[in-house]
Amino acid sequence: MNISIDMPDEVRVYVEAQMIAGAYSSMSEYFLDLVHQDQKRKAQAKLEALLKEGIDSQGQEVTPEYWQNLRSTVLGQNSMDNANNK
């Protein structure tokens, strides 16, 4: 897909300087890198929000049953199936 971007001369000069310095081989590469950085930043913010939510939660007692249910959930198995297989 081709996208046309109107940008001020200062921005164009800056991007061209990045290309001349060898940081990027084209303007497209520069803007793709900006998008990837934005995606990473948003993923990091989401992770931090989830971690904070976990830290701020009341929590749960960790018992052998807790671990078994967690294993079953992660492995996509029913905890009853695991109990029957023992």
Image (tube, rainbow, N blue to C red):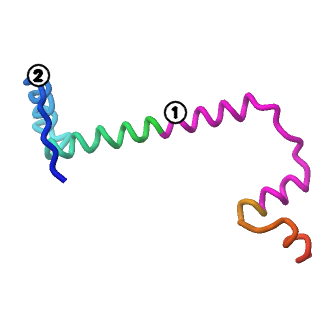
Task: Please state the extent of the stretch shown in magenta in the rendering.
Answer: 43-71
**Residue matched to label 1:** 45
Percent position of residue 73, x then y:
75, 60
Task: Tell me how far mark 2 sits from mark 1, CA to CA.
Answer: 30 Å
Q: Is residue 23 above or below residue 84?
A: above
For badge 2, the amino acid type reads Glu
Q: Residues within 10 Å of mark 1 (few under 14, many from 20)?
A: few
Q: Secondary structure at mark 1?
A: helix
Q: Which mark is residue 10?
A: 2
User: Residue 75: percent from the left, percent from the top?
Assistant: 71, 65
Q: Earlier in the sequence, mark 2 or mark 1?
A: 2
Q: Return the residue nearer the eye: 70 or 23.
A: 70
Residue shown at 90% from the left, 56% from the top: 65
Comparing 25 with 85, the one in front is 85
The quadrant in which residue 71 appears is bottom right
Quarter location, residue 14: top left
Identify the residue at image location x=10%, y=30%.
12
Q: Residue furthest bottom?
A: 85
Which of the pair 24/48 is nearer the observer? 48
Taking the spot 12% from the left edge, 41% from the top edge, the residue there is 4
